[in-house]
Image (cartoon, coloured by chain):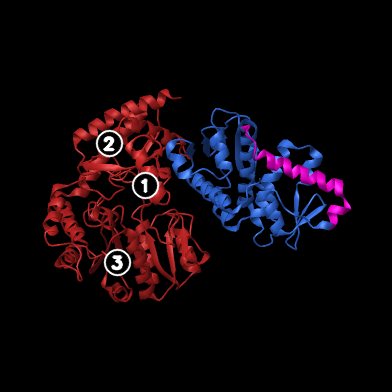
Amino acid sequence: MLQKPMIVENQLPLRAAASAIYSCAQSILADSDIKRLRPKFLPSGEVELGNLLIFSEEQYYRLLSKGLGIPKIRNLFLSPIQSIRLILSLWRVAQLYKSKDLKVSSPIQLKASLEAICTYLNLHPYSSKIFKPEQGFSILIGISNTETNFLICYEQQNGWKVYFLENQQSASASLLFKDIKIAQDAALGRLNSWISLTNGNIVVAGRVPLIDKFGYVARLVQKEVPIPG
Amino acid sequence: MNVGNKSGLLYQRANKVIPAGIYGHVAPGAGLPQDFPLYCHSGNGCRFTDVDGREWIDFMCGFGAVLHGYRNPVVEEAVKLQQQFGSVFNQPTGLMVELAEELVAQIDFADWAVFAKNGSDLTTWAIRVAREQTGREYVIKAKGAYHGVDAWCDPGLGGRIASDRLHVLEFDWNDFDQLDTNFKKYSGQIAAVILTPYHHPSFGPSVLPQENFWNRVEMLCKESGTALVLDDVRCGWRIDDHGSHKYFGFTPDLTIYSKALGNGYAISSCVGTNEYRSGACEVFLTGSCWNDSLAMAAALACLKISNEKNVANSVLKKGKEFCKRLEELAEKFGIPLKMTGVPSMPYPWIDGDDNLFQIQKLCKIATKYGLYFHPHHNWFISDAMTENDITESLSLSEKVFSEYKLSF
């Protein structure tokens, strides 16, 4: 069974953003640096990174959304080199969101946004409730004419999870972005999903209730979760 | 949607001033967003023309709101006549009384009738009447059944709070034992059971009631002092000219009609027995234009047409002919297409296509031939559909099936 963590009220958007950042880190950083970006949400409401830096919720939000969060000073001085390395890692993730190389950045950003959505599917009370009947189904999210395909499905152990797909294997529903630019716009919350459905920027097929619910949660995440950079 | 055509341009304008551009069951995402027209211009008989001038053979009839064909001359004449006098006044016109009398005369169990504009207005009101009359809180509905847009039953996702459905119980259609279990568990607390004449959910095949299902439900409700509410909004006048309960052989306490009642003029009605009259008197009911005499004139004309022409039988017959030949045609191409539900409102289902990819593909191809086949909702057969229309639709369907087969 999926063990749901205790969540300090209103921390879910930060958790979702953190999972997005962690996903980016997995794509661009060395193993040792990736670990540092796995956040620990403290019962006090503070957030700890790499067992080093502790941020207040507000500063962590600033760090995620603006790249400028100020940690509590004490640890910064206790391990200055490690702290700077961690801050540099965060900076590199933030840079990815400013990258103009869409071929590289767009699939990573798309995966990161799907990780944030999965965090909601697992932990957001209403989102997980409406997705409960969909647990036996899966949704493919990809970019047309590329090898970027992800599958979101439910597992007893891990809950809703994103997987890379080698090819567009069968899923209960599919959502394909027209190209890498459209996928990036979607990942960064810049896309009007209603218009995109009608002008072909997004093509959906398959199990409609699953697509509807996915769209609802994706828009909720878009509204609530800070986008890195 | 072609962004350069009128439909596309209208939709872009709409998105600036209307949330989501087009909403509800006609939202692009609910159908085939890049293939169905987004805006209509005109209609005649069983065909309509979109804003880009393309004509379609229609199998949706304004999602059921039009039974006698677009711009039916008898209905239009009745409306035109009333337009000379006006539509909405401080008080209702005599047409309201006339219409209530006509419904009470035509619906065998009905002792009274009230009017509103949409099905939802009165499914929700009927539930409240049942609660008022019985002094109970709980309502039972079938899983996946649509009864309107109010918070206790809407299929959407937004704007809900936990208490919205606190007193709404569900059971699987046709599973009488499950319904009975709910009655036992909430003994003496069930105000109403609300059901459609048969199960016609979106995204799945329609299911007819099993033998004795309705009689057992009726008996259970009677024994428990629970109101049996029939949501005949979609089926009304498409299965039987005097209410769908007649077709399935049972008697409800309250029934809600809309759609075909006005042939495109917004009107709904709830009819009920004397037992529920006092409850009906106590539950507040009104709306800005609910006394609209034009819609009432249209409804009177519709009832007259249905009675004189035996329209329910006519659309059942036309639907049966169309569905049978469509299935045969599909079989010729090795496509396991089944037209489920009643033939006047058939739902297309391809065996093994649980996730709807194949029916979506088929209906998408159909749009190229001007056939408005919906992949997710039951279709509606217009009484304006002629033998020639059916033949033409089948001939085009043959091309659709051929192209569909070639796509594999």
Question: Mark 1 — on which chain does it sit?
Answer: B
Q: Which chain is red?
A: B
What is the magenta range? A74-101
Q: Position of residue B379 (x, y in %)?
A: 32, 43
- Quadrant (top left/top right/bottom left/bottom right) for the N terminus of chain B: top left
Report, in whole angstroms, how far the alpha carbon at label 1 lies from the one at label 3.
Answer: 24 Å
Q: Which of the pair B81/A205 is nearer the observer?
A: B81
Mark 3 lies on a secondary structure that is loop
Q: Residue furthest top?
A: B406
Res B131 → quadrant: bottom left
Q: Chain A in the picture: what colour?
A: blue
Give the mark nearer the N terminus: 1 vs 3.
1
Q: Which mark is residue B56?
A: 2
Q: Position of residue B125 (x, y in %)?
A: 34, 67
Q: Residues within 10 Å of mark 1 (few under 14, many from 20)?
A: some
Q: Which residue is mark 1?
A: B26
Q: Which residue is mark 3?
A: B287
Which kind of residue does numbered mark 3 sit on? Gly
Question: Mark 3 — on which chain does it sit?
Answer: B
Q: Position of residue B59 (x, y in %)?
A: 29, 41
Report, in whole angstroms, how far the alpha carbon at label 3 lies from the one at label 2.
Answer: 35 Å
